[in-house]
Amino acid sequence: MNKEVFKTLIKEGQEEIKDIELYPRHFSFEEEGRYVLVGIRQAGKSFLLYQRAKMLMQAGHDIKEIVYINFDDERLLGMKAEEFDLILQAHASMYECKPILFFDEIQNIEGWEHFARRLANQKYSVFITGSNAKMLSRDIATTLGARYFDEKVFPYSFAEYLEAKGIQLESDWMYSKLRNNIQLQFDDYFRWGGFPELLLYRNKRHWLNGLYEKILLGDVILRNNVKNDQALRLAVKRLAENVRQPIAYNRLVNMIKSTGLSANTASMIEYIRFVKDSCLMFTLDNFASKFSEKETVKKHYFIDNGLLNIFLNDADPALLENLCAITLYKRYNNDDYSPQLFFYNRNIEVDFFVPSEQLAVQASYSIRDEETRKREVNALIQLHAAHPLKKAIIITYDEEETIEHQDLNIQVLPIWKWLLLE
């Protein structure tokens, strides 16, 4: 690596930022803050860097101050942590101002956190993105020493999706003609998810298949030197097919073995950790289980409905629960060190439980069937008896009512409305 490469990349990055057209996302940057933004590939992290750079330029900063480097660039293959300083040297040889640094997918360079800490100590403005959840680990946080704000970045929420499609919600939208359009738009969002770039493509399944392969091959298999990639691929497929059910690692191993592939529990635990590190999936614990069960029996969800949908036929019930999980996870489990969102499974089955908020949520595509209705309602009533609830909700695809039972009111809401009211 040499300074000339970085001089070229700095200049290219400045041109890209000047020319890019943005749909601004609702993200509030602290004026003097440094940031580590982490999320799945294509969630929009790079655009948040561009957005911040343009905000700084509008505030009076010169484009010469901006240094944007994407570490996915093939010209940086093989780069070592000790070569980071060449970026500062390259900028200093081009301009006399202090740079504002934007580093995209920095996790590709092992040891990046030590350079990031030095930059903070030297009072540089720094904005970093990565697609590996380990960047939010306690080890990294300890190294950075509270010098950075760490934030998770997700694909579009439904409200953001509508804005990106040019649909502005009026205060009385539920009573206007706009309501029908919103419901039509929701069907696409429900099935294909909220990756910003996906809005540009008609063949959404093809694009999502390509993204999944890039994540699985690059961020999971190659990064972690996985030898038994067939077992890993099959494990992800089985988790997708059973997304609504708690699964024990040994049961997953038996599913893999039944196809003739070799697998063991220790390697399966590692594989799922790798997949979670890539931000492809997240897990929820059973609030009602003992510690040992919490660690071995979990529910596994995909971070975007589109990525789940590519695995499934007759996907609607699974997609509805997965979208509920994403929405609640963003709100209540943003700090992985102290999660607030669980499922509840001990004689009672409740899909989502937030004990700190006394909130329980059931995900049921429809409760028109009397047996289904009774099951979903009774589970909430029984949970309320054991852990008093302030709020109980059943999320459906398009049904709405209020069910009263003694001191518990259960709201039944269509998911598209719930997403916009929350």
Image (cartoon, rainbow, N blue to C red):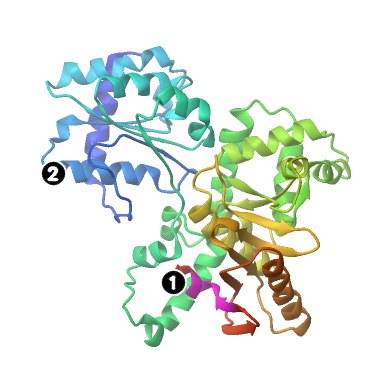
Which residues make up the magenta segment?
410-418
Q: Quadrant of the N terminus?
A: top left
Choose the circle earlier in sequence order: 1 or 2: 2
Tell me which amino acid carries mark 1. Answer: Leu
Question: Label 1, on which residue?
Answer: 421
Secondary structure under badge 2?
A: loop
Badge 1: few (under 14), some or many (20 or more) residues near its Cα, within 10 Å? Answer: few
**In the figure, is residue 185 to the left or right of 359?**
left
Identify the residue position indicated by label 2 in the image. Answer: 59
| Residue at x-position 67% and y-position 57% | 343
Amino acid tagged 2: Ala
Comparing 136 with 156, the one in front is 136
Vertical arrangement, residue 283 with respect to residue 165, above or below = above
Q: Locate residue 405, reporting x and y percent.
A: 66, 82
For marks 1 and 2, give the CA distance: 34 Å
Label 2, residues with CA under 10 Å away: few <14, some 14-19, many ≥20: few
